[in-house]
Image (tube, rainbow, N blue to C red):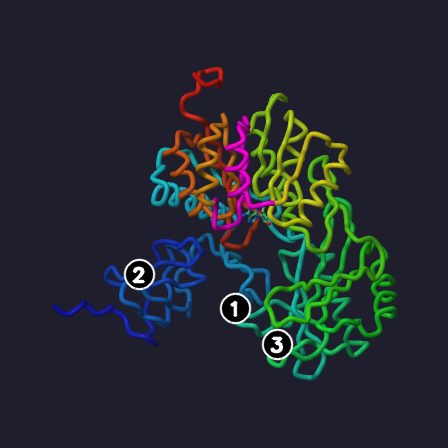
Amino acid sequence: MSKPQPPVNKNETIELTFEDLTHEGNGVGKVNGYPLFVPYALPGEKAQVKVVKVKKNFGFGILLDVKEASQERVDPPCDVYEKCGGCQLQHMSYKMQLDMKQKQVKDAMHKIGHLSHVPVHPTIGMEDPWRYRNKVQIPVGETEEGGLKAGFYRKRSHDIIDMDTCVIQDEHNDRMVEAVRRIAEKYSIEPYKEENHRGVLRHIMVRTGQTTGDIMVVIITKTKKLPHQEAIVQEIRDTFPNVKSIIHNVNNKRTNVIMGDQTNILWGDKYIVDTIGDIRFNISPKSFYQVNPTQTKALYDQALQYANLKGHETVVDAYCGIGTISLFLAKQAKKVLGVEIVAPAVDDAKKNAKLNNIENAEFYVGEAESLLPWWQSQGLRPDVIVVDPPRKGCDESLLNAMIQMQPEKIVYVSCNPSTLARDLRILEDGGFETQEVQPVDMFPQTGHVECVSHLRRKNNNSDGRLS
Ligand SMILES: C[S@@+](CC[C@H](N)C(=O)[O-])C[C@H]1O[C@@H](n2cnc3c(N)ncnc32)[C@H](O)[C@@H]1O
């Protein structure tokens, strides 16, 4: 029997009514049951669509003209929204973004974790979901007139879009990038060219301490020397009297990794300071630090509430970075053991503990999936385990060690609902019960969502102790 042909052809223009959204925020419309995914279309809308890709079971289209708009459609404030790959949801009301993220988490719990009974709360959003990012890394290229341009890459390419502002960035970052671009142009600093690995200036990175106003700028070049270094530093200082740290980083490799191994402090401190709640953090150029500190506070408050510490507990914080969650936990626990794979981040975590006079937090360099099984074999039985892994989730050996350690509670922080649901299923099968999941909007205007979940060991008495 011959296979049924898709009911649309490539390059055909059709009228489509949209019923749903994908997790990335693309509209979904169906032609005789055949789904077409169309960026920037919203459920309830009717629109003219050009079919651009036809696969066996689904296709893709581009939105040509919205005939009947959804009430949730809003004008994106960014001039380059549809060219740049950074944001996906600026055309959607913020309320709809938050609902979409909650649904994304519920769907993952249901379809991947088979945990339909677990309450997934409404997403915690921001009062003002713009200009929240404290860090920007912008590539530099050449304009047609031979000047310098600085902007994000066009979607699915390495073409740089010349842009004046990014509406999700802290304004200081925007202004600093523009100032460094202008100063570098004045001193005829050549932009780096990926095609032939020639030139000088590759990226400009800016980080701002949102609560302190500290600014760090990192100028990343292919060359060992930054030409006109002294004059450039002086001009940056004159333009931004509150700059705290001016850094030069050398990256002479053919790579997509932004920073290289050699970092020179040109002027000022080697780190900036920011605070989350009442904890201060020293942040050096390469440290991982959450990009949305306002929502990080909301996320950590929720994690702390789920941990419900009384002061006698031993807590393990796996994937601890520079100790951000660990130091929050340490204030309310007997002892916290942090594990992190990146050695400089562990150095920062130790320094951050000292900076905050916290003496009951210890930090270890290593793979969480190796160190926790080792601790388990040595008899460590923490009361609470917190995990905050990268997108791929936890390794199975780590999950097994957690199950065998039998903590009363597990607090699982995740930036990927699919791997979260997969891992919760394994922990449920190992004797834990997921109590609730709280999505937090760390990245407004984008399709990403962060979650914090609360698990308890199943065979607890009402006082929380093992029977
Ligand atoms: C999502 S971040 C969380 C960091 C920290 N909890 C925070 O909130 O700032 C994940 C961290 O896991 C670290 N990491 C990645 N793989 C790891 C592994 N196998 N073992 C331990 N840490 C790892 C990364 O370097 C990164 O710092």
Check disc 1 and report its element: helix, strand or loop: loop
Who is closer to the viewer here, 37 or 14? 37
Residue 218's quadrant in the figure?
bottom right
Queried whether the magenta region covers residue 130, the answer comes back as no
Who is closer to the viewer here, 28 or 240? 240
Q: Is residue 251 above or below residue 74?
A: below
Residue 87 seen in the current view: yes
User: Magenta residues?
Assistant: 366-394
Q: Which residue is mark 3?
A: 194
Q: Which residue is mark 2?
A: 35
Which of label 2 and label 3 is nearer to you?
A: 3
Q: Are marks 1 and 2 in contact (CB under 8 Å)?
A: no
Instruction: Answer with mark 1 or mark 2, whichever residue precedes in sequence.
Output: 2
Residue 26: x and y in percent read 42, 59
Queried whether the magenta region covers residue 393, the answer comes back as yes
Does any atom of ligand 1 lie closer than 8 Å to the CB of label 2? no
For image coordinates 44% across by 56% down, the residue present is 25
Looking at numbered disc 3 in the image, what kind of residue is underneath it? Glu
Residue 107's quadrant in the figure?
top left
Residue 306 seen in the current view: no
Check disc 2 and report its element: helix, strand or loop: strand
Instruction: Answer with mark 1 or mark 3, whichever residue precedes in sequence.
Output: 1
Q: Specify the label residue 155 is tagged with.
A: 1
Q: Is residue 83 left or right of residue 250?
A: left
